[in-house]
Amino acid sequence: MSNDRSDDEIGRLARGTLLPAFGGAAAPGWLLAELERGLGGVTLFAINGNVPGTEELAALTGELRKAGTPLVTIDEEGGDVTRLGGHLTGSPYPGNAALGAVDDPALTRRVYRSLGAELAEVGVNLNFAPSVDVNTADDNPVIGTRSFGSDPELVARHAAAAVAGTQEAGVAACAKHFPGHGATSTDSHLGVPVVDAGLEVLERRELPPFRAAIDAGARAVMTGHLALPSVTGDVPATLSPAAITGLLRERLGYEGVIVTDALDMDGASGAIGIPEAGVRALAAGADLLCLGPREHEESLRATLAAIGAAVREGRLPLERLADAAERTRRLKEWLAGRGPAVVDRSAGLDAARRAVRVSGELPRWNGAPPLVVELEAAGNIAVGPTPWGLGPWAPGMVRAAGANGEVAPVLERAQGRGLVVVLRDAHRHTDQRAFTTAVLAARPDAVLVEMGLPVWAPEGAVHLATYGAAQANAQAAAERLGLTAAA
């Protein structure tokens, strides 16, 4: 195959690699027209108003399928990163950290099967999950509770279970963020994280979960926008032939679809722009380009033009586009033969309850319920503004920023009653730690509830860890605290 093919063929193949976004709960005309011309699919984002409710979403995906055979993708991890309704209320499924804390792969498989069944019901057929990063950096700003844990073997067995469960529901799983985002201290939405580890360390730490996901039959793998100097130099993996073709295809033997993380992230396109990042990702071996939530018609057209120019200039072999199209075709063929599973939401609460860990003895509240104080903790860009905390089970809950001046009023309001302080990744927030230390000095009987990773815990304090801030985690904590009866 040579590069002197018609513009129509180049355009058709190029369209098949793209996953743009769009605004609203109805498909715009330009998107339907592009689907008719062979667009690979779309990525749904709650922040774009694509997911106002399950009925509306099912109607939307049905509309998309009347125009073509798209991959309908979403970033639904359960836990703290949730898009399918959970962005409004919190997810009914705990995230990976809670599942890793329980360490029951059969339960992880059950949770992901139910989550996949919910996606299948509304017409989503490719889920950008599970995250199989091994979270070895406590201060990791973007992974944290999205990881099953810090032990590569534990993460590997749950990666395999999550892939199996998702795909038993007729939805393709996508293991991410290759070759592993867990040892970073930079958010790839904002820059290029660096994992300064040689291949020997990668083989021992980052790669086992990806091998397990591949062995479990993962239909897709997502690349991360992070550099590994020993493999990619200063180039992020998403744009690196050494990472995609050399490490993932050749060393790990992966034959499925490779999809990029969102190309609007600074880690991929900050210095070169989205169209050029798309060209380089395809040349490196990626098959599908997730453009990002803000990238709609204009970005689609610019990326199509850049791909076409790169093919005509000889920078991007047409054979590479044809290879991407073939892998995507095989994925769609696999999806066409799959049947849905049954939604089992009880799996989420079961997992969240089993994940709760308590240090010390929880008090019994006599008379008035305790004062619950929730300290502010903004989620990262991947998490977004998803609701969290014990508010639904704690009427009169107080929210605080963690400033010194807030301690005395809280103590005054808590006189004569119990006190619960709700934290989220306190090890990453100086104000949370300072506020909590000051409160404990006056009220050593206060109970701490950590809804992130339980890295920081004052000695002697009664401490409850949920390993996540999903609705299911919060309900499990409320039950253990006696704020609500177990259902």
Image (tube, rainbow, N blue to C red):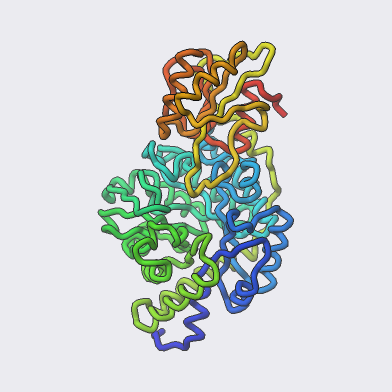
Is residue 17 something one can see in this rendering? no
| Percent x, y of residue 87 | 61, 47
On the picture, is 466 further left or further right than 206?
Answer: right
Classify 61 as above or below 163: below
| Percent x, y of residue 4 | 40, 88
Along the viewing direction, whichever of 315 and 418 lies nearer the viewer: 418
Residue at the spot 39% in from the left edge and 57% down from the top edge: 266
Is residue 112 something one can see in this rendering? yes
Residue at the spot 70% in from the left edge and 55% down from the top edge: 121
Residue at the spot 54% in from the left edge and 67% down from the top edge: 296
Along the viewing direction, whichever of 433 and 281 lies nearer the viewer: 433
Classify 461 as above or below 81: above
- Asked where in the image residue 185 lies, by quadrant, the reply is top left
- Asked where in the image residue 67 lies, by quadrant, the reply is bottom right
| Percent x, y of residue 270 | 37, 61
* The C terminus: image quadrant: top right
Q: How many marks?
A: 0
Along the viewing direction, whichever of 296 and 323 lies nearer the viewer: 296
* The N terminus: image quadrant: bottom left
| Percent x, y of residue 148 | 48, 40
- Asked where in the image residue 319 lies, by quadrant, the reply is bottom left
On the picture, is 357 further left or further right than 392?
Answer: left
On the picture, is 150 further left or further right than 60?
Answer: left
Along the viewing direction, whichever of 473 and 369 lies nearer the viewer: 369
